[in-house]
Image: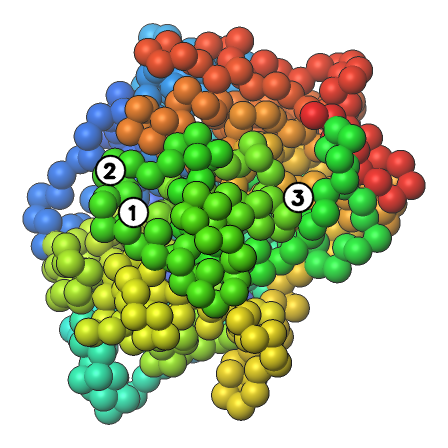
Amino acid sequence: MRSMTWGGLALSTLAFSACGGSDTADINTVPSFVRGEISNTYHDGTTDDLLTAGLGVTGLKAAAPAFSNPAAPTASELRRNAIYVNYRAVVDYTDAGGFGRLFGPNIDATGNVITGAGSEGKVAGHEYIAVSDSGNGRQNVTLMVQVPDSFDAKRPCIIAGTSSGSRGVYGAIGTAGEWGLRRGCAVAYADKGTGNGLHDLMSNEVHSINGILSPRASAGLNALFSVELSDAERSAFNTAYPNRVAYKHAHSQQNPEKDWGKYTLQSIELAFYVLNQRYGNLVDGQHTRSIHPANTLVIASSISNGGGAALAAAEQDTQGLIDGVAVSEPNAQPGSNSSLVIRQGSATVGTHSKPLIDYFTYANLYQPCAALSSRTTQGLSTVFFWPASYQTAAQNRCQSLRDKNLLSTNTLAEQANEALDKLHAYGWAQEQDYLHQSHFRFATNAIVMTYVNAYGRFSVADNVCGFSFANTAGDGSVTAQVRNTQAALFATGNGVPPTSGINVVYNPSVGGAKLDFLATSPSTGRADMALDGALCMRSLVTGLDPVSGNSLTGDARSQADRVAQGLSEVQLSARLRGKPTLIVSGRSDALVPVNHASRAYVGKALLQDATAPVRYIEVTNAQHFDTFIALGALLGYETRHVPLHPYFVRAMDAMWNHLNTGAALPASQVVRGEPRASGVSLTASHVPTWSATPGDKAISFSGNTLSIPD
């Protein structure tokens, strides 16, 4: 044995060669959670690579590559396009937005643009894929480890990059993947049991782990997801609800979120296994665990849901696998947190620390009406995501809320302002007002549908609150699936409809099932964006009828109890086992509002241990969807918001330096992002770094109060 310095600590570790005899009792074995074979594919860094699938930074900026046969893409084509889509889904992929100049695959570990050889940012190395499952194919969590050729077995490092949102296993390729591969680290990925799995109930086709669409019987145990219905049950469902599909996150009946931390830890364990198969000492023809937690630097990272998974993994890490955590905009649900006080400037935040499905079902009621308020600075327009029919439906939503006494004012303008005030009182900040319209259009209904179903472990056949997933026509009616679209869905989808042509449908709409945005509520007779369904979803989260305030009874009570049970299983403790943790969030985040997530989680961690090494950076004018900035004037984000991704990179750099050299983590503080004018390219001045001495920008914690400067 010998002592080596790594991660800023002097460690007694097994030698890589000189002390092989000490390794005999530590033979490298396949982790018990792995079902089936572990695939190993080498990517040469020229025609194909780990980071950009051979596209390079130029290809990632360009139009999506075509499939040779759109009706039957190959597995390699699906992988390529999945990397392309997932990269662009989480960053501003335009040159004006900084991609390829300030961040991107062609930026080296020191932040400089790579010139000459390697200027496209391609990374050669091995890609391993395994499936975590109990053996019956019901979980089939995809795990992946990428090992770049630059990996140094004498200074091993692993970056955990669990997918954001409900994306497939490549979901963190443009965040944790890019950062880790550029550092020469192995990157451990997990789709965390959500993934991008679809089951077409009409054709009975599913996607396999490699993305190929095939008959359910042919896919067998390799189906990424399939529903638990007999042929007779599926036939009956199709007769009653034709052309519907099921999605893994919503309909797996596994409540996968409860295991996001576990799957993240499994991805790290898999990384140790494959690294030792490649680099471990040989003893009697068997590899040993020469690379192990004591001599390997491990950072749990990622963004959004992946960031929440990293925090959950740190809380659950009884094996000491993780050295530090660096995450951005995490979906962090801290559970009961009534002792915490959050102050922004001189104002106390009235409502905070609500569970995600609580604040989303609340937004699902009021957000479309609030989007009409002139105070959002946007108002309704005829842009592509809010056509005239949606404008009318939003106005109807306001009136229907008034008729049910959920609003008290009478004119449309008053009702819109009142709805916005309700969102403010429930934890959203004024800095998030502009985003309510686009978020309701692209996210709110999808998350409500997915998470209520997931928490309650409901089957697709339950049609909870009357909602289902299907393709829709221009008038909102249900249409048949499109084969070419489905065949590509492994690459193009995000795991949470609306995605790739599949939308949320309200089955009880007057006149027949309709796209929820165009659905007419039976109780109001208005096309009010399916208010009846939204009220039902809200009731299953609170256990109360939102209109009468009465407790639910009968089947509704039973469903609400199931949701409550699932919700209780996903709340985090904020006990991070002493691991240094750096959290970055945007103050304007309207999807995962900081009062319910990052601020609440950090506050709870410090309530339990005021000396915990937890740091929090809050960036003004930054929000959740950097990719929306790339749409320019179409959404108007680029002149109002700065990308958060540069701060994720800096957070990773800071954690790396802290673990490597003992450098201090940045002090918790507010950083003021500076939006650019129209037509102006993003520069470093728009995304200033944090300060070593934040002064009046410092975020502080005292007693039970987390104080955030304005």
Q: Secondary structure at mark 2?
A: loop
Question: Relative to the observer, which residue lies in front, 697 or 209?
Answer: 697
Q: Residues within 10 Å of mark 1 (few under 14, many from 20)?
A: many
Q: Mark 1 and mark 2 in contact (Cβ < 8 Å)?
A: yes
Q: Is residue 140 above or below residue 642?
A: below
Q: Secondary structure at mark 1?
A: helix
Give the number of the disc on residue 595. 3
**Counting residues from the N terminus, which is met first, the one under dot 3 or under dot 2?**
2
Colour mode of the rendering = rainbow
Q: Mark 2 and mark 3 in contact (Cβ < 8 Å)?
A: no
Q: Residue visible at 71% across and 15% down?
A: 691
Q: Residue visible at 67% across and 18% down?
A: 690
Q: Is residue 522 above or below residue 654?
A: below
Please name the amino acid that badge 3 sits on.
Asn
Give the number of the disc on residue 391. 1
Q: Residues within 10 Å of mark 2 (few under 14, many from 20)?
A: few
